[in-house]
Amino acid sequence: MKDLSRIVWVLFGIMIGFAFAIGMKNIPTAVAGNDRHEDFVMATGPVLVSTNAPTDGVWLLDYKSGKLQGSVIDRFSGKIVGWAELDLAEEFSLPPRQNVHFVMTTGIVGKEQSALYVAETTTGKMGVYTMGPRPDGMAGAIIKRQDLSLFRKPR
C-alpha cells in the first residue's frame, strides 16, 4: 500500500509539472531592449543568421559620428562576432555638423528576426534596418536597409 501511495504522488507531481510547463508557453518574454547615454543609443533584438541558429543582435548608434553599428552574439561562445557599420549621415543626407536628433527602437518582423527603426526628427526621415548573415559566409552580420521614408516634412 505504501508503494502505491508513492506512485500516486509521483504521477500527481508529473501531471502538475506538465500543466505548469504548458502554462509557461503563454507567458510573454522580453525580446528587445533600448538604452541611451549622452551621444550613444543601444538596442537589442533577435537576429536570424541561419535557420538553425537564431541569436541576439546588438545595435549601437553614435550621434557624433553618425555611425550605426551592429553585431551578433555567438550562441556557443557568448562573444560578439565583429561589427557591421552603416553611415547614417550619408543614409539620411545630413549636412556636416548638423544638430541631429535620432531615436530608435527594435520590433519583431518575423520568427526570430527583429528590425531596427531609426528616426531622425529634424529631417523627418525614418529608416528600417535588419541584420542578416554576411554574403561571403564569414562570421558576423551585415546591416540591410529595408526602407527609408519621410514621416513628416523637414523643419
Image: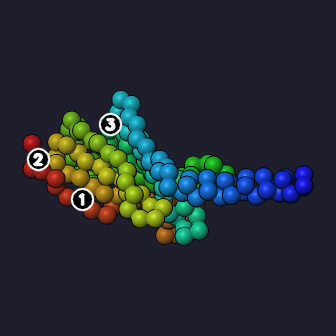
**Which residue type carries mark 3?**
Lys
Q: Is residue 102 visible?
A: yes
Image x and y of residue 154, in percent: 11, 47
Query: Which sits in the foreground, 107 or 123?
Result: 107
Check disc 2 and report its element: helix, strand or loop.
Answer: loop
| Alpha carbon distance from label 1 to label 2 | 14 Å
Q: Circle 3 sits on which residue?
A: 64
Checking the image for residue 148, the label placed there is: 1
Q: Earlier in the sequence, mark 3 or mark 1?
A: 3
Image x and y of residue 50, in percent: 54, 68
Q: Residues within 10 Å of mark 2 (few under 14, many from 20)?
A: few
Q: Earlier in the sequence, mark 1 or mark 2?
A: 1
**Which residue type carries mark 1?**
Leu
Image side of residue 94 versus residue 7, left or right: left
The residue mark sitting in front, 3 or 1, is 1
Check disc 1 and report its element: helix, strand or loop.
Answer: strand
Quarter of the image for the N terminus: give it. Answer: bottom right
Checking the image for residue 154, the label placed there is: 2
Quarter of the image for the C terminus: give it. Answer: top left
Which residue is located at x 50 percent, y 51 percent?
A: 27
Which residue is located at x 27 percent, y 52 percent?
A: 90
Query: Which sits in the foreground, 85 or 8?
Result: 8
**Which residue type carries mark 2?**
Pro
The residue lying furthest to the top in this view is: 38
Color encoding of the figure: rainbow
- Residue 122: quadrant of the picture: top left
Q: Are marks 1 and 2 in contact (CB under 8 Å)?
A: no
The residue mark sitting in front, 3 or 2, is 2
